[in-house]
Every structure is written in structure tokens, then in C-alpha cells.
């Protein structure tokens, strides 16, 4: 039902263009014979009989738009670079709406395809390592297999087994300046619009950082390590402690509810004189990663942990640039540590390995879409409203535009549906893996 408005409009206004799948409009088709084949003796057209004024052969039609073809919702480079006014004679205000609509459609489709592929790969790996056989055509199918496999594998653990999963989340910030430049190009304006971060502004800190510092590549942490510490660790460890726990050697490595000394896999909080990855809580110290605390000077390459809101930007362009930022966000890796408390059990090692290896990718997808569900709903509404306005405006370019508009609508509806389903699937797998 989402495309009812467009189907009805297409039938009423663009019968020739929409009903002609072959695209036989004068701007795109080959030469058309003046009379049917075998009808050389046919009389003159009715217009000539009625005394219609003669048109000089070869004279251009002043009202005809330039010959061109609008970009498909599969090519982001062409969508960004396409000049609607030059290629199809579209007036500037309508061209801006078309850039926003086509951009939103292409970014939603690309993001949906990317997320589906990442999630399908991770879920299929979990399912396969836990004994599920077969191939999986999509992320929802693979993730349901992963959920079933996780439940079945836990049921096979030696009794009484207790599963605990600890995770350091993935961070997926959006580049604020990139969103502003996108909005400028989309609107066709000379000025870059102002933007605010609804969330936390993070970035590279050339001064000193006071607070969390995301350390994406393992390195030194001149503060409290929040994540994985490979050696010389002292503190609490929700993950696996390797070394001493409250002064007593941990053999085999495992849970430490007291003070861990040695190394902490995945989720710890304490002093790390070795290499720390994940997060580092600093106190007025240099941050080699992304400073998410207070920086003593303005951060460079500011990013937003949340959503970027643009001022004086149309709904179509705002949706396009917001989805583009999500698609291009570079996420830090989630870290996962799994413990199975109970009798020594080979099945527990298989379960632990499958979850620790592949759940981080599921959590990354969950985090990338998390908080963006409202943006997807807004994007879908912006495309619908934009298509209505473009259709109502009419104009000589509409015979060429009509099939493209239907494609943008279809790409948006299907892409949003896919992303919403991927979000549900990722959350279901994460919940199933965390079930104790």
C-alpha cells in the first residue's frame, strides 16, 4: 500500500510514460514510422486534413526538454553528480528536491544491502559453527538459524552450566562536516548550513582529553583501560582474567570477581601498562584515538555519536545526507568475552568460540542502526512527500522522470523495510547470545 499514491498518479497523469516499459517517448526511442508497415497508400494524418499548420522539417521544439536519462537508484556517484537542470531542463527548486529524493533512495538501498550482507555473514557463521547446515539467502533467514543454533547449543552444555556474555560496544560516529557539505551540494547553495549534534560530539583531540578515549588500534593508555588489556593489567575484569585474582593464580584463566592482575580479555576497567584496545578513560592526557570526553582545544574532524541535525535544509536533502552519513560511518569494533561456568565441557569451547568470533559483527550492525529507526521513518516520509510535489509540478521532463520516480519510491520502501528487519534480527541474535 505504500506506493498507492504513485501508482494512481502514474495511471492518471503519465499513462504514456508509465505504461510504456520500453521507454518509447520521443526523447529516448528510435525513429517512429509515419505509417504502419505495408500502408504506403494510407492517407495523410488527421491533423493535416484539419488544416493544421505545417512545421518545418528539422525545426527544434522549444518546449522539449534536453535529451537525457535520470540516474538509477543504484549508482551513488551518478546521483550525486547529476545535473537535473542541465540534463532534463528541470527548474532549480524542483532539481533540489530531486537530488534529495534520488540521494535518499540510493543511500537507503546501499545501506540496506551492506547491512544485510554483513549480518547474513555473521549470523551464518554462528549457525554453522554451532552445527546448523545449509545456506541462507538473507540476513533474517541466517539470523533465525543463528538464534535456533544458540538455543540448541546451550541446551547441550553440561549441567549446571551458566553462560555470561560481556561486551564493549561498537561506536559508530557520523562526520558532521561531511553532512554539512552534502547538504550544501544537495540544496545547490553557496553557503554551508549550520549543523548540531544531538548526542555527543567526538573527534581527534590535538590537545588533552579528559574522559573516554576510544582506542581503535591497541596502544598505550595513560589512564583507566576500558576494554581489553594484553598485559600488566590491574583492576576489575568482567571478561576473562589471565594471571592472578586477588593475589591467587587463576588456573585455568577465567572469571575474577575481585582484583585481576595480568591481562583482561575484552571487558575490563583498570590500569593497563601494556596495550589497551576498546576504550581508555583519561584525565587531561593525550588521546591517540577518538576523544569522547572534553578536549582542551576544539576537536578536529568532529563527529557525532547520535544524529546530526541540519538547519535550513529541506526534508529530502536532510534525509539524504543523514542516511549518507550512516552509510559512511566507520565503526569501532565491539569486543565480546564469553564465559561458561560449569563442568569442563568441549561443547562450551565451541559455543564460546562461535560467539566471541562473530557476535561483534552483529553488535556493530545493531549499533549502526540503533537510534536511526526514526531517521528511516522520516526518510520514507520525505521521499513520499517529495515525489508528490515533483509529480504535481508536472513539466516537459515528466515523461522521462516518471519511471525513475517509481524506482526511487520502490528503492526507499524496500530498503527501509530491509533495514528495520535487519535491526530486529540483530537484536534477536544479541539477546539470544546473552541469555544466561
Image (cartoon, rainbow, N blue to C red):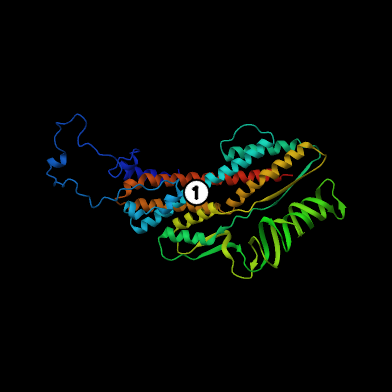
The total of numbered circles placed on residues is 1
Quickly name the residue at label 1: 108
In the rendered image, residue 196, in percent from the top left (x then y), is placed at 53, 64
Quarter-wise, where is residue 158 in the image? top right
In the rendered image, residue 50, in percent from the top left (x then y), is placed at 13, 42
Tell me the SS state at disc 1.
helix
Quarter-wise, where is residue 153 in the image? top right
Q: Is residue 11 above or below residue 235?
A: above
**Which residue is pictured at 47% across the width and 47% down the height?**
412
Q: Is residue 131 above or below residue 273?
A: above
Residue that protrudes farthest toward the top in the picture: 38
Left or right: 228 as drawn, with respect to 186: right
The N terminus sits in image quarter: top left
Pointer 1 local density, CA inside 10 Å: few below 14, some 14–19, many at least 20 = many
Left or right: 188 as drawn, with respect to 34: right
**Which residue is pictured at 50% across the width and 47% down the height?**
110
**Which residue is pictured at 73% across the width and 59% down the height?**
225
Decide which of 416, 91 is in the foreground and name it. 91
In the rendered image, residue 161, in percent from the top left (x then y), is placed at 79, 41
Decide which of 28, 158 is in the foreground and name it. 28
Left or right: 16 as drawn, with respect to 240: left
Left or right: 155 as drawn, with respect to 49: right
In the rendered image, residue 182, in percent from the top left (x then y), is placed at 47, 58
Residue that protrudes farthest toward the right in the picture: 248
Q: Is residue 110 above or below residue 258?
A: above
Decide which of 36, 284 is in the foreground and name it. 284
The C terminus sits in image quarter: top right
**Which residue is pictured at 29% across the width and 42% down the height?**
25
Decide which of 392, 321 is in the foreground and name it. 321
Amino acid at each position: 500500500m505504500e506506493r498507492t499514491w504513485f501508482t494512481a498518479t502514474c495511471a492518471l497523469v503519465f499513462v504514456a510514460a508509465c505504461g510504456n516499459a520500453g521507454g518509447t517517448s520521443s526523447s529516448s526511442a528510435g525513429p517512429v514510422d509515419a505509417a504502419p508497415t505495408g500502408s504506403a497508400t494510407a492517407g495523410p494524418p488527421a491533423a493535416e486534413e484539419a488544416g493544421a499548420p505545417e512545421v518545418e522539417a528539422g525545426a527544434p521544439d522549444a518546449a522539449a526538454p534536453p535529451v537525457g536519462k535520470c540516474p538509477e537508484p543504484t549508482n551513488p556517484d551518478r546521483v550525486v553528480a547529476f545535473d537535473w537542470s542541465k540534463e532534463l531542463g528541470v527548474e532549480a527548486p524542483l532539481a533540489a528536491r530531486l537530488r534529495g529524493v534520488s540521494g535518499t533512495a540510493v543511500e537507503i538501498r546501499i545501506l540496506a544491502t551492506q547491512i544485510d550482507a554483513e549480518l547474513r555473514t555473521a549470523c551464518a557463521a554462528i549457525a554453522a559453527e554451532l552445527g546448523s547446515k545449509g545456506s541462507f539467502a538473507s540476513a533474517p533467514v541466517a539470523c533465525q538459524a543463528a538464534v535456533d543454533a544458540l538455543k540448541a547449543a546451550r541446551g547441550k552444555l553440561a549441567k549446571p552450566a551458566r553462560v555470561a556474555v560481556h561486551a564493549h560496544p561498537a561506536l559508530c560516529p557520523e562526520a558532521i562536516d561531511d553532512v554539512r557539505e552534502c547538504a550544501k551540494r544537495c540544496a545547490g547553495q553557496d553557503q554551508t548550513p549550520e549543523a548540531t549534534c544531538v548526542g555527543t560530539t567526538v573527534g581527534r583531540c590535538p590537545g588533552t582529553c579528559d574522559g573516554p578515549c576510544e582506542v581503535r588500534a591497541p596502544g598505550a593508555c595513560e589512564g583507566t583501560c576500558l576494554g581489553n588489556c594484553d598485559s600488566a593489567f590491574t583492576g576489575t575484569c568482567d571478561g576473562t582474567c589471565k594471571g592472578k585474582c586477588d593475589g591467587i593464580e587463576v588456573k585455568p584463566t577465567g572469571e575474577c570477581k575481585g582484583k585481576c592482575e595480568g591481562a583482561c580479555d575484552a571487558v575490563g576497567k583498570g590500569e593497563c601498562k601494556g596495550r589497551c584496545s576498546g576504550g581508555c578513560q583519561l584525565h587531561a592526557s593525550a588521546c591517540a584515538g577518538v576523544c569522547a570526553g572534553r578536549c582542551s582545544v576544539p576537536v578536529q574532524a568532529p563527529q557525532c555519536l547520535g544524529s546530526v541535525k541540519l538547519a535550513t535544509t529541506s526534508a529530502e536533502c536532510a534525509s539524504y545526507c543523514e542516511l549518507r552519513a550512516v552509510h559512511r560511518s566507520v565503526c569501532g569494533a565491539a569486543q565480546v568475552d564469553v564465559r561458561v561456568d560449569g563442568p569442563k565441557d568441549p561443547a562450551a569451547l565451541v559455543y564460546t568460540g562461535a560467539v566471541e568470533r562473530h557476535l561483534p559483527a552483529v553488535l556493530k550492525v545493531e549499533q549502526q542502526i540503533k537510534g536511526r529507526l526514526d531517521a528511516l521513518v522520516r526518510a520514507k516520509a520525505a521521499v513520499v512527500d517529495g515525489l508528490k510535489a515533483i509529480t504535481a509540478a508536472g513539466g516537459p521532463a515528466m515523461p522521462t522522470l516518471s519511471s525513475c520516480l517509481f524506482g526511487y519510491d520502490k528503492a526507499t520502501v524496500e530498503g527501509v523495510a530491509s533495514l528495520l528487519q535487519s535491526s530486529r534480527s540483530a537484536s534477536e541474535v544479541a539477546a539470544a547470545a546473552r541469555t544466561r
